[in-house]
Image: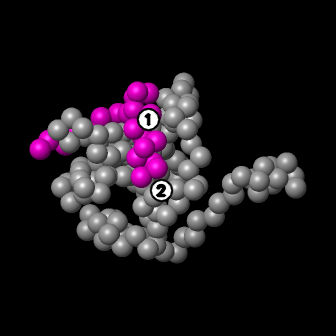
């Protein structure tokens, strides 16, 4: 069984959205997915898109994906790679696909002189946490993520 990682293309947008929905189901947040195929096409594949997608295949069939973008660290004075989502279908887990996909992303980070490769994981997702720790990744427990979105974001931007 051969694992292949390739850049996502616009024709992958429906599959990427299907994987996003499966991931949201797993994370108990399907109701939060509002993206459409057109949104995926625009945000990943339009000119000037800042996010990038990868497709993971086993024997030529899509079994997972990753979406990432480059951020910047002022302390390092270098770009960083931020992994927004990584997903491997449940029946394909444990066969090396996730590790292969993460290693591919690490190579992209190194090729782009990134000082860090970072991602977030839900605090209850013990299988993922254990997997990441087995690879040498360490949690950054002193940092707390904050978010503005939807109405709060728009009202703040408008001075409300």
Q: Residue furthest left?
A: 1
At 30% from the left edge and 35% from the top edge, which residue is drawn? 6
Q: What segment is highlighted magenta in the picture?
A: 1-22
Location of residue 69 in the rendering, given as x and y in whole percent from the top left corner: 48, 43
Q: How is the image coloured?
A: one colour
Q: Is residue 17 magenta?
A: yes
> Separation of disc 1 and disc 2 at Cα?
15 Å
At 35% from the left edge and 33% from the top edge, which residue is drawn? 7
Which mark sits nearer the N-terminus, 1 or 2? 1
Looking at the image, residue 79 sits to the left or right of residue 149; the answer is: left
Location of residue 149 in the rendering, given as x and y in whole percent from the top left corner: 69, 54
Secondary element type, mark 1: helix
Q: Badge 2 is on which residue? A: 24
Q: Badge 1 is on which residue? A: 14
Secondary element type, mark 2: helix
At 40% from the left edge and 27% from the top edge, which residue is drawn? 11
Q: Is residue 84 magenta?
A: no
Location of residue 54 in the rendering, given as x and y in whole percent from the top left corner: 36, 39
Residue situated in front as seen by the camera: 33 or 128:
33
Vertical placement of residue 54 versus 83, above or below: above
Location of residue 36 in the rendering, given as x and y in whole percent from the top left corner: 55, 38
Please identify the quarter of the rendering in which residue 117 is found: bottom left
Looking at the image, residue 129 sits to the left or right of residue 1; the answer is: right
* Residue 105 is at least partly visible in this image: yes
Looking at the image, residue 97 sits to the left or right of residue 132; the answer is: left
- Disc 1 to disc 2: CB gap under 8 Å: no
Vertical placement of residue 153 versus 42, above or below: below
Image quarter in which the N terminus is found = top left
Q: Residues within 10 Å of mark 2 (few under 14, many from 20)?
A: some
Image quarter in which the C terminus is found = bottom right
Vertical placement of residue 154 versus 27, above or below: above
């Amino acid at each position: 069984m051969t694992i292949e990682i390739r850049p996502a293309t616009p024709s992958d947008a429906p599959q990427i959205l299907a994987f996003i929905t499966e991931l949201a189901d797993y994370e108990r947040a399907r109701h939060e997915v509002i993206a459409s195929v057109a949104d995926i096409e625009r945000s990943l594949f339009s000119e000037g898109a800042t996010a990038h997608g990868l497709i993971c295949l086993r024997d030529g069939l899509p079994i997972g994906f990753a979406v990432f973008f480059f951020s910047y660290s002022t302390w390092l004075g270098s770009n960083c790679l931020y992994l927004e989502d990584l997903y491997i279908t449940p029946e394909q887990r444990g066969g090396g696909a996730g590790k292969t996909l993460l290693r591919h992303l690490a190579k992209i980070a190194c090729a782009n002189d990134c000082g860090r490769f970072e991602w977030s994981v839900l605090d209850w997702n013990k299988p993922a946490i254990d997997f990441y720790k087995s690879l040498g990744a360490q949690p950054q427990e002193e940092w707390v993520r904050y978010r503005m979105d939807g109405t709060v974001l728009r009202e703040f931007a408008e001075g409300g």
